[in-house]
Image: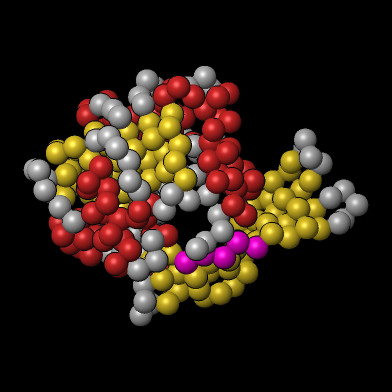
């Protein structure tokens, strides 16, 4: 089990202000209505944005620390009554209502470590969607050239200044690809540097299993979905060879 509690207090330095994908999810939510289910909701970035637009949203995440932050955000935004947060693995949820839409953003689906776990999760989510309900999964496309760059080098990714705490925070990452297993082994290293030069390092390792376009289509078909579209950006551009994203929009078939 990946210890995402280690990441929780750093997560919003990187993703807290990201909103480029919000209009896409709001557009699909306006189309099908709520309630909405987010798998791997993290610190509540999308949960709060969707709730602020008037939808009832259930967010699922394995990390209690992430959910604690999401809960505070919902309260601060005045949408706590529209948000339900559940600590659980994405592949083993058991909720007692049908959802009109489910989403899994920012590569979170790849945190399911093998083909069996990914298929198990898709079937689980299928049971939680009403017939015809939408499932949106946002992945990075596995460009061979880009994957080849992940060769185990230590790379400085970001530097943040935490004025309130008086700290400089540096994020490094190390990524190594196993092409035979379609896995990326990742280490995030967060260094908190105090004004006197004292350093505290937090290391967070995890594994991502990437998928190709047609592999993902076959998984969705096998799990009871019909793929409606594949997009290459949050602006819903067509998926092409050089697209930065690989976004699957599928709907739950019939009464399966």
Q: Residue at x 52, y 61 (%)?
A: 2
Q: Is residue 207 above or below residue 256?
A: below
Q: Residue at x 39, y 35 (%)?
A: 58
Name the one closer to the observer, 133 or 91.
Answer: 91
Q: Is residue 20 visible?
A: no
Please provide percent x and percent y for residue 164.
77, 35
Q: Is 100 situated left or right of 47 in this image?
A: left
Name the one closer to the observer, 173 or 126.
Answer: 126
- The region drawn magenta spans 203-207
Name the one closer to the observer, 69 or 151.
Answer: 69
Q: Is residue 168 found inside the magenta-colored segment of the image?
A: no
Residue lying at the far left of the rendered structure: 254
Please provide percent x and percent y for residue 200.
78, 58
Q: Is 231 situated left or right of 143 in this image?
A: left
Q: Report the coloring of the rendering.
A: secondary structure
Q: Residue at x 19, y 37 (%)?
A: 130
Q: Is residue 177 visible?
A: yes
Please provide percent x and percent y for residue 173.
59, 63
Q: Is residue 204 found inside the magenta-colored segment of the image?
A: yes
Give the image quarter of residue 128.
Answer: top left
The secondary structure making up most of the magenta span is strand
Q: Residue at x 17, y 43 (%)?
A: 251
Please provide percent x and percent y for residue 51.
41, 25
Q: Is 176 situated left or right of 94 in this image?
A: right
State how many labels appear: 0
Residue lying at the far right of the rendered structure: 196
């Amino acid at each position: 089990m990946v210890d995402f509690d280690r990441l929780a207090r750093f997560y919003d330095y990187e993703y807290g202000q990201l909103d480029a994908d919000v209009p896409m999810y709001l557009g699909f939510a306006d189309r099908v209505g709520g309630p909405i289910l987010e798998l791997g909701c993290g610190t509540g970035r999308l949960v709060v944005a969707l709730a602020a637009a008037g939808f009832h949203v259930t967010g699922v995440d394995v990390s209690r620390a992430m959910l604690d932050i999401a809960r505070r955000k919902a309260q601060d935004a005045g949408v706590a009554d529209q948000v339900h947060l559940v600590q659980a693995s994405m592949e083993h949820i058991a909720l007692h209502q049908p959802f009109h839409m489910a989403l899994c953003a920012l590569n979170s689906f790849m945190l399911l470590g093998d083909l069996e776990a990914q298929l198990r999760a898709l079937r689980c989510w299928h049971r939680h969607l009403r017939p015809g309900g939408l499932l949106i999964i946002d992945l990075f496309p596995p460009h061979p050239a880009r994957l080849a760059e992940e060769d185990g080098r230590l790379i400085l990714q970001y530097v943040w200044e935490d004025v309130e705490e008086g700290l400089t925070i540096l994020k490094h990452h190390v990524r190594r690809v196993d092409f035979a297993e379609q896995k990326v082994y990742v280490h995030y290293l967060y260094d908190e540097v105090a004004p006197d030069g004292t350093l505290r390092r937090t290391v967070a390792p995890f594994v991502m299993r990437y998928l190709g376009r047609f592999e993902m289509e076959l998984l969705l078909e096998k799990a009871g979905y019909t793929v409606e579209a594949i997009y290459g950006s949050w602006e819903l551009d067509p998926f092409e060879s050089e697209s930065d994203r690989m976004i699957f929009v599928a709907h739950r078939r019939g009464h399966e």
